[in-house]
Image: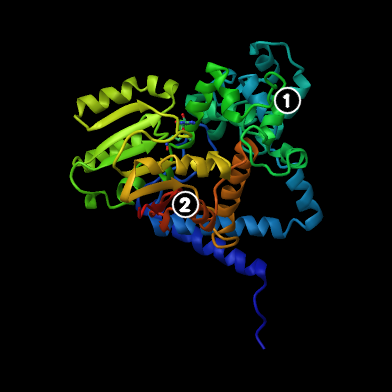
Amino acid sequence: MASTPSRLAELSNTVSKNTVILDQYLRDNNIPKPTFDAHDPIWDAEFPPDIQKARIALQDASTELIDLTTGSRRYLSKALNGGVTSMDTLYHLDIPHKVPLDDPEGITYQELCAKLDIPVNEYALTRILRAAVVHRIFKEPSPGRIAHSAASRLLATDALLFDWLGAAIDVMAPKQYIGQAITQFPALDEANRSAASLTFPKRDGEYVSFYEYIAQDPERAKQFGRGMSSFQTGDGYSPRHLVDGFDWGSLPEGSLVVDVGGSHGDVDMAIARKSPHLRFLVQDLPETIASTGKARKIVHDENLNIEFVVHDFLTPQTVKGVKIFILRWILHNWPDQYCRQILQSLLPAMVPGSRVLVFDGVMPGLGTLPNVVERDLRVFDLTMLGCFNAGDREVERYRGLLEGVGLRFGGCWRPEGSRLSCIVGEWEG
Ligand SMILES: C[S@@+](CC[C@H](N)C(=O)[O-])C[C@H]1O[C@@H](n2cnc3c(N)ncnc32)[C@H](O)[C@@H]1O
C-alpha cells in the first residue's frame, strides 16, 4: 500500500511548485530577482492575480514548514519574543540616516557612535544592530562594519515610511497593554479606555483617546498623517478599487455623494474623473479641511465638482437629499457605540433609496484565507483594538451595526486586489 506523503513533504512540494511559477514569471518579464542588497530594486510590485496567488502560496507553505519544524516549546518562546530587534532604537537614534547610503563597505560601529546626537554604549548598539542584521535589516559586510541592506536603505530613503515606523513605535504599539486594559476596563467600548490610553499621559486626571493624544502635538499629528499615507501607498489601498468596485454610473445626473471623514478627497477626485455627472462633498474636522489647499487646487484645475466642508461626523448631518454617503476607513477606528452614532447621524440627510457605502477592512472567517494573509489581518485588527477599542469587523457585525440604526443590509464584496471591502446599507424610509 502506497504511504501518504507527510505534511512536510506536501509543503515542500507546494514551495517548489510555486517557486517555479514565480521564477518563470520573473524571467519572462525581465523582472530582477529579489535580493537583500542595498542597491537592488525594491520588490514590492503587485503581480497579476495568478502569480500573486503563487507568491502567497509559496510564503504560506514556507511559513508552515518553519513553524512545523520548530516545535511547540520553541515556537511559543519565539511568539513571546516576536520583536526583530529594538526598532525604537533604530528610529529614535536615527540610525538608518547615519549609515552611509552608498558605501557597501559601510562604517565601523565606533564611527557610527561618533555620528549619533547623543553618546551611546557602543557594545549595546552593536548587539542591537546585529539582531537587526540577522533579520536582514542592515548588513555587516566585514566584521565590525555596518552597511545598508535593501530594507534599511528603504528606511533611509523613504521619508513617509520612516514616519510610519515612528508612528508605529511611538503611538501604535499598545498590543502588550491589551491585557491590562481589558482587566481595567472590561467592556473595551470607549475611545479613551483603550490599551493606548493607558500609555498616554492623562489630561486633567482623565485618560485620553488616541486621537485626543495626537491632536495635542502638531508634530505627532503630522508624523501620524504621513505614516498613514505611507501605509496606504500599496495597490491594495488604491482609490481605484472604490472607483471600479461600485456602479457610480447608475446614479442619476447631479446626485450628491458625501464623503464622511473624507480627508483630502483622494477617492472623490478619482471617482469624479470617471463620473463627472456626480456632485461631491468632502466632510472632515476643521484642521483637516484647513489643510486641503493642494487638493482644492487639483479640484479647481481639473474642474471637478467637489466641495470641502467642516462637519463633525458624530453630530447629525445638516445637508439634505444625499444619494450616497462614503465611509472609507472610518468605522475601524471607532468602538461600536460610536459607529452607531456615526451611522445614526447620517439618517436626517437620507431619502428613500439613499445608501451608505462603508469601505473598510472586513475580517474573514477563521482559516478561510492563506494563513500568512490572515496573520497580517489579525495583527492589524489587534492594533486597532489596542489603539481605538475598534477593529476590522466581521461582515455580520457590520450588518448588525447597519440594521441597528434602521438601514437595510445591501451586501458586502471585496473588489479584486483590494485590502478593503464595500459594505452597503440602504435607507428605505
Ligand atoms: C483613517 S482616516 C480616513 C480618511 C479617508 N476617509 C481615507 O479613506 O483615506 C480618518 C479620517 O476621519 C477624520 N475624523 C476623525 N474624527 C472625525 C470627526 N469627529 N468628524 C469628522 N471627521 C473626523 C480624520 O480627520 C481623518 O481624516
Relative horizontal placement of residue 342, taking residue 180 as reference (left or right): left
* Residue 248 percent coordinates (x, y): 26, 49
Secondary structure beneath dot 1 equals: helix
Residue under the point 61% across and 69% down: 10
Q: Is residue 171 visible?
A: yes
Instruction: Name which quarter of the figure residue 300 lies in.
Output: top left
- Within 10 Å of disc 2 (Cα), the crowding (few <14, some 14-19, many 20+) is many
Which disc number belongs to residue 402? Answer: 2
Figure quadrant of the N terminus: bottom right
Q: Position of residue 410 (x, y in %)?
A: 39, 58
Q: Which one is in front in this view, the residue at disc 2 or the one at disc 1? A: 2
Task: Give the camera-side residue of 233 and 51.
Answer: 233
Does residue 337 appear to the left or right of 234 in the view shown?
right
Label 1 CA crowd tier, 10 Å (few <14, some 14–19, many 20+): some
Residue closer to the observer: 349 or 421: 349
Could you say which is closer to the camera, residue 341 or residue 252?
A: 341
Q: Is residue 302 above or below residue 8?
A: above
Q: Is ligand 1 within 8 Å of the beta carbon of the residue shown at mark 1?
A: no
Give percent across and percent down for residue 347. Answer: 40, 44
Q: How is the image coloured?
A: rainbow
| Residue at image point 44% right, 39% down | 345
Q: Amino acid at mark 1?
A: Thr
SS at mark 2? Answer: helix
Does residue 329 show up? Answer: no
User: In the displayed image of the protein, which residue is found farthest to the right?
Assistant: 73
**Dot label at residue 126:** 1
User: Label 2 sits on what residue type?
Assistant: Leu
Q: Is residue 224 left or right of residue 176?
A: left
